[in-house]
Amino acid sequence: MTGGVGEPNAISIAFFLAFIALSLGITIWASRKMRTADHFYTAGRSVTALQNGLALAGDYMSAASFLGIAGLVALSGFDGLIYSIGWLVGWPIVMFLIAEPLRNLGRYTFADVLASRLRQVPIRIAAAIGSLAVISFYLIAQMVGAGNLIRLLFGLPYELAVVIVGAVMLVYVLFGGMIATTWVQIVKAVLLLTGAALLAGLVLARFAFNPLALFEEATRLYGDGVLSPGRLVTDPVDAISLGLALMLGTAGLPHILMRFYTVPDARTARTSVGYATAIIGCFYLLTFILGFGAMVIVGRPAITAVDAGGNMAAPLLAAGVGGTPFLGFISAVAFATILAVVAGLALSGAATLSHDLWVHVVRGGHSNPKEEFVVARLATVLLAVVSVVLGIAFKGQNVAYMVGLAFAIAASANFPALVLAIFWRRLTTAGAQWSMIVGTVSTLVLIYLSPAIQVDLLKAASAPFPLRNPGIITIPLSFAVAIIVSLLRPVASEEEGFVALERRLHLGVD
Amino acid sequence: MTRSLTALETVSAARWRIAVTLTVLMMAAYFGFILLVAFDKTLLATRLAPGLSLGMLLGAGVIVVAWVLTWVYVRWANNHYDRALAELRK
């Protein structure tokens, strides 16, 4: 049943090369249009609602969710659904609280929103610390995942796979900027959705297109337990803590937030989140069918024989229902997914380094656009090198907790300051700055003290901090710091600035 | 606060109200589901039909709630918020 998984097969390589050729074609086309820093960061603000909806969905649907959730459902049934839902419910929050204000108040990064009414330098530094921490952990998780995945899918050595991902990503971002990154993301999103839908269709065709018949077959093979909550959620506090981080972290991910600057206005931003929510919801419902399909058609022993974590469930299922050509297609789609997500992350990291740190901190806001463009591209090269080095350094590590960590930092460091800057008149520079710093540091410290690091990684008998996810402590803490510091030392001029902000928040730049 | 609200403040308050209401509804649906998973596993294991447990129905229901709330916001914004903003721009 393992039919070719882990061996380089001609069809998967052909599909993969076709994707690389197409995406490099897009990059060449994009490089002709890219002349300024504005194109580099925002694709000239000309992306339509459907395009941005697909690109947002593409940024969000990583290989980890495609392969990871399908595997989780295949191995633990119902419990996998808890994760799928957690990843989706952040999107309505993005819609209600963040998308339109962000579009109207900022230019390139979310720190622009805070800096529009607070003092530039301290805000930019604090926001950069939070953003770079999120981006680094997210990048490490993607790189390590990419190395493992490509080794399993194509049989390439881990290090070579990491270098290939770093190099191709560098080409996209460096030469094509946001225009190429957006279009690569759109192509990948369409491929991923088509692939997942085809795969689910082939599975359901065996069950007269009745998902319930598939689930019923699963209970016949593996017992009634597959349809009910198992052992994944045992501690309710930990479950809520993880839920908070997933829900609010989505609204604090720099590479997602940056996409709202690529559309022409707030109304387009709104519509694009509607598309993204619909697409991502469908995708997670599909992964659920794929997980149960793999459980029934491939079988749990065959899945764990290839990869103990279950990550190969979807590719094995593709081989099972569609043979080697379909396996090749799904493998190439998974690789494309990683490339696109890594490119989006690198671009948002470059924006933080060049726009927030170089232009507004080092040069005190007196940099010309030409210089910013050069610095942004140098930052991209730096990030590509760093991500390859980190990807190789973290080889063999369990990456699941790093994605959790990235979401926890995004929810604790970025989300509270951003939402308060938009909605709370009395927020001060010091309040926002300390909220972001305390949010980042407390999350890092509590994760270090948690069982995920102390017990699983360092093999200690117990951990000083009992929760695997610190969100339930660090998110309220970060809000509290912002509010208390702001109230203790009110700044009248910053409160007055809120009137102008409120006008721009709704009406945009006049 | 005796002064009358400006037109912008009225729009802002309306948007804030709907944003908070919808956010609270979304969180209630999601965390309600998580709490059921944590505290009443036997209830969620209840079989409604062959191949369908209450837990799966509610789980898919949370996704549907996310879609519906998002749709409600888009409808409200397209009809009411945009019109109020157009008035303000005049």
Image (cartoon, coloured by chain):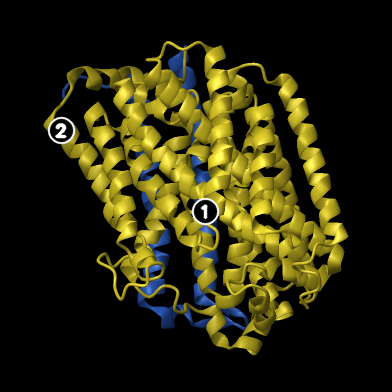
First along the sequence among labels 2 and 1? 1
| Quadrant position of residue A132 | top left
A230 on left or right of B21: right
Amino acid type at image mark 1? Ala
Amino acid type at image mark 2? Leu
Q: Residues within 10 Å of mark 1 (few under 14, many from 20)?
A: few
Q: Alpha carbon of mark 2 to alpha carbon of mark 1: how far?
A: 44 Å
Height in image: A220 above or below A454? Answer: below
Front position in the image: A228 or A76:
A76
The blue-coloured chain is labelled: B
Q: Secondary structure at mark 2?
A: helix
Front position in the image: B14 or A258:
A258
Q: Name the subunit of mark 1.
A: A
Residue with the mark numbered 1: A393
Q: Do discs 2 and 1 share a chain?
A: yes
Q: Nearer the viewer, mark 2 or mark 1?
A: 1
Residue A480, how many percent across, how many down? 21, 44
Q: Residue at x 68, y 27 (%)?
A: A175
Residue A390, how many percent across, how many down? 52, 49
Front position in the image: B36 or A309:
A309
Q: Residues within 10 Å of mark 2 (few under 14, many from 20)?
A: some
Q: Residue at x 36, y 71 (%)?
A: A455
A273 on left or right of A314: left
Q: Residue at x 61, y 72 (%)?
A: A310
Height in image: A286 above or below A506? Answer: below
Labelled disc at residue A487: 2
The yellow-coloured chain is labelled: A
